[in-house]
C-alpha cells in the first residue's frame, strides 16, 4: 500500500491542518490557513501538503511519457490528442525519421497512436512533445485502453509491482501513459483480461486492498469485470472523512 | 396577497403559520443529491429538491468553442441552463430563451469566481444544467447540482457553492419557495453562497422587500445554504462510500 494507513478524504473548501507545510497540488492558502481545492486524499509530502485527487483532467507535466493519437497532419508536424486540454503538436524534428516538407502523412496518419514524452510546458500551458528517446515511437498492434489519469499510479503500483503482476498473470506487455492510456500487447484473451483489470482499478482504485482484489480477479481466471463487490451496500472502503 | 387579477389566490400561510405543503417558514424542501451519475461526462450530479429534478454535467477543461471567446490567461466557464419541454405544466418551447440565457450567464459568473480558472489558460469549462422537472428554484437547484458535478470532475475550486431562494409570502419571509409561493408571493430572492468566506456569488431579486426584510431574508438564506452545503458534501462522500465519522484532522 503506497498510502498512509489513515487516509483522509477532503472536499473543496475543507480546512487542512498545514503542519508547517507549504501548499502543494490540490490545496490553496487564504488568510493564513490551508484549504483543499479538489476532492481527494490528503497526502503530505514535505515540504508540500498535497491532495491526491480522486478524479480530474490530465495536466501535462515535463517528462511525462504519454500515448497520443494523431488528429491532424500538417506539412511539418502532426497534432496529437494527449487527453490534455489542447491538441499538442509533434514536430517532424521530434521523430527518429528523416522527413521532407509535406511528407508527414506518409509516416503517421490520423487515428494512429504514438508514445511520446512531454519535453516542456510553458507558462501559457503550451505543451511540446518528442518521439526521440528510448521506448518512444509509433504504436503498432495491440489495444489501447483508457482509464482515469488519476488512477495511473495505482495501475503501476509501488515500484511497478501491480503492472508486473498483471503482465505475468495475463502474459501481456503493458505501456502505461501518464495520461491514462494503456497500450496492451498479447493474445485476445490476455488483452480482455487486462482490460477487465484496468476497469477494476478505475472503479475501485481508491479502495483499500486493491492488490488483493486484482490478484483475486486474476486468480479467478475471469475474462469480464462485473463491477465492485459490496459497493452498493454502502460499505466503507477505508477512507475517513475530514469532518470535524 | 398576490395581485393576480381574477385568478383565485391560494392561502400561502395558514393560521398556524404553516405553508401550503406543511412546512414552517424556515424549512427547506426535501433535498437529495447524487454525484457521478453520467459516464460520458467528466463530472456529473443529479438533484431532487422538492418537485424539482435537475441534472448537471461538466466537461473540460477543453478547447474553447467558439474560438474567439478564448482567453490567454485563464479558462472561461460556459454554462448552459436549459429547461426540458416537459419540465413545466404547459409545454415549454425548446431551446434558449431570454430567461435561460440570463440564468446561464449569472451561473457562469458565479462559478467563474470560485474556480481556479488561471490554472487552465485558453480553455473552457463547460457546465450543462438540464431541468427535467421544475417547481420554482430551478436556478438554485442547478447551481447546487453543477457545484457537485464540478467537484466530481476534479476541477479545483475555492469551495462548493450551495444556493437557495428566499421569498416573502403573506407578508412573512420564507425559505425555499415552491411554485405557488413563487407565483403568488410578494418577493423572490435567489442567492448562492461561498460558505467558507461568506461571500455571495449570486444574488437576484424579484418583487418588493423592505430593508429589514431583505436583511432577514439574507440571514435566512445563509442558514439554508449551510444546510444544503452539508447535503452536497455528503453526496460527494457517498460517491466514494466514505463513512462520515471521526478523524478530527481539521485544526480550527
Image (cartoon, rainbow, N blue to C red):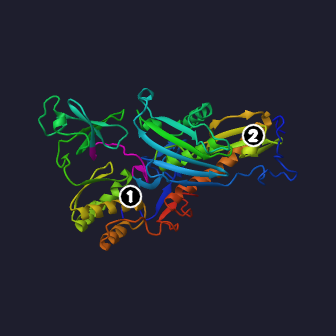
Residue A61, magenta (yes or no) = yes
In this view, the residue farthest toward the front is B91
The image's mark for residue B183 is 2
In this view, the residue farthest toward the left is A98
Q: Is residue B137 visible to us here?
A: yes
Residue A34, magenta (yes or no) = no
Image coordinates of residue B79 in percent, x first then y, are 52, 37
Residue closer to the observer: A139 or A242: A139
Q: Is residue B216 visible to us here?
A: no
Residue closer to the observer: A47 or A212: A212
What chain letter is assigned to the residue under label 2? B
What chain letter is assigned to the residue under label 1? A
How many neighbours does mark 2 have within 10 angstroms: few (below 14), some (14-19), or many (20 or more)? Answer: some
Q: Is residue A229 above or below residue A51?
A: below
How many neighbours does mark 1 have within 10 angstroms: few (below 14), some (14-19), or many (20 or more)? Answer: many
- Frontmost of labels 2 and 1 is 2
Image coordinates of residue A51 in percent, x first then y, are 44, 51
In this view, the residue farthest toward the bottom is A220
- Element under disc 1: helix
Residue closer to the observer: A215 or B29: B29
Image coordinates of residue A150 in percent, x first then y, are 38, 52
Quadrant of image for the N terminus of chain A:
bottom left
Residue A126 relative to residue B245: left or right: left
Q: Tell me what residue is drawn at x 25 percent, y 54 percent.
A: A143
Q: Which residues are magenta?
A: A46-68
Label 2 and label 1 in one chain: no
Quadrant of image for the C terminus of chain A:
bottom right
Q: Tell me what residue is drawn at x 52 percent, y 53 percent.
A: B35
Residue closer to the observer: A143 or A136: A143
Image coordinates of residue A56 in percent, x first then y, are 42, 48
Q: Quadrant of residue A59?
A: top left
Dot 1 corresponds to which residue? A202
Amino acid at each position: 500500500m503506497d498510502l498512509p494507513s489513515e487516509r483522509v478524504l477532503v472536499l473543496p473548501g475543507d480546512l487542512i491542518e498545514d503542519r508547517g507545510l507549504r501548499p502543494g497540488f490540490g490545496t490553496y492558502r487564504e488568510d493564513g490557513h490551508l484549504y483543499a481545492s479538489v476532492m481527494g486524499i490528503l497526502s503530505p509530502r514535505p515540504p508540500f501538503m498535497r491532495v491526491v485527487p480522486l478524479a480530474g483532467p490530465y495536466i501535462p507535466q515535463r517528462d511525462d511519457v504519454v500515448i497520443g493519437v494523431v488528429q491532424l497532419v500538417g506539412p511539418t508536424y502532426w497534432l496529437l490528442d494527449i487527453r490534455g486540454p489542447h491538441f499538442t503538436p509533434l514536430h517532424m524534428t521530434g521523430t527518429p525519421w528523416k522527413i521532407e516538407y509535406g511528407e508527414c502523412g506518409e509516416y503517421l496518419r490520423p487515428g494512429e497512436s504514438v508514445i511520446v514524452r512531454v519535453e516542456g510546458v510553458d507558462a501559457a500551458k503550451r505543451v511540446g512533445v518528442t518521439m526521440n528517446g528510448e521506448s518512444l515511437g509509433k504504436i503498432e498492434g495491440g489495444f489501447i485502453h483508457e482509464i482515469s489519469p488519476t488512477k495511473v499510479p495505482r495501475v503501476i503500483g509501488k515500484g511497478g509491482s501491480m503492472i508486473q503482476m498483471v503482465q505475468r498473470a495475463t502474459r501481456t506487455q503493458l505501456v502505461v501513459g501518464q495520461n491514462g492510456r494503456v497500450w496492451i500487447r498479447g493474445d485476445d484473451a490476455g488483452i480482455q483480461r487486462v482490460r477487465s483489470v484496468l476497469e477494476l482499478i478505475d472503479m475501485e482504485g481508491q479502495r483499500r486492498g486493491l492488490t488483493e482484489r486484482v490478484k483475486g480477479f486474476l486468480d479467478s481466471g475471469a475474462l469480464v469485470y462485473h463491477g465492485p463487490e459490496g459497493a452498493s451496500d454502502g460499505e466503507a472502503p477505508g477512507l475517513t472523512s475530514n469532518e470535524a | 396577497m398576490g395581485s393576480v387579477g381574477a385568478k383565485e389566490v391560494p392561502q400561502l400561510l395558514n393560521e398556524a403559520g404553516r405553508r401550503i405543503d406543511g412546512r414552517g417558514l424556515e424549512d427547506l424542501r426535501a433535498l437529495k443529491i447524487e454525484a457521478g451519475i453520467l459516464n460520458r461526462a467528466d463530472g456529473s450530479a443529479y438533484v431532487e429538491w422538492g418537485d424539482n429534478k435537475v441534472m448537471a454535467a461538466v466537461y473540460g477543461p477543453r478547447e474553447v468553442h467558439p474560438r474567439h471567446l478564448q482567453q490567454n490567461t485563464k479558462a472561461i466557464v460556459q454554462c448552459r441552463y436549459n429547461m426540458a419541454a416537459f419540465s413545466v405544466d404547459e409545454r415549454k418551447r425548446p431551446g434558449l430563451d431570454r430567461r435561460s440565457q440570463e440564468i446561464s450567464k449569472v451561473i457562469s459568473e458565479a462559478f467563474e469566481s470560485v474556480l481556479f480558472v488561471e490554472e487552465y489558460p485558453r480553455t473552457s469549462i463547460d457546465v450543462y444544467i438540464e431541468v427535467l422537472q421544475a417547481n420554482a428554484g430551478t436556478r438554485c437547484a442547478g447551481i447546487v447540482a453543477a457545484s457537485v458535478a464540478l467537484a466530481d470532475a476534479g476541477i479545483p475550486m475555492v469551495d462548493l457553492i450551495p444556493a437557495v431562494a428566499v421569498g416573502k409570502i403573506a407578508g412573512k419571509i420564507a425559505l425555499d419557495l415552491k411554485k405557488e409561493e413563487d407565483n403568488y408571493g410578494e418577493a423572490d430572492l435567489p442567492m448562492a453562497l461561498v460558505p467558507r468566506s461568506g461571500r455571495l456569488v449570486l444574488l437576484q431579486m424579484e418583487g418588493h422587500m423592505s430593508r429589514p426584510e431583505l436583511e432577514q431574508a439574507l440571514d435566512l438564506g445563509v442558514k439554508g445554504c449551510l444546510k444544503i452545503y452539508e447535503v452536497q458534501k455528503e453526496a460527494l462522500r457517498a460517491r466514494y462510500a466514505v463513512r462520515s465519522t471521526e478523524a478530527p484532522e481539521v485544526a480550527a
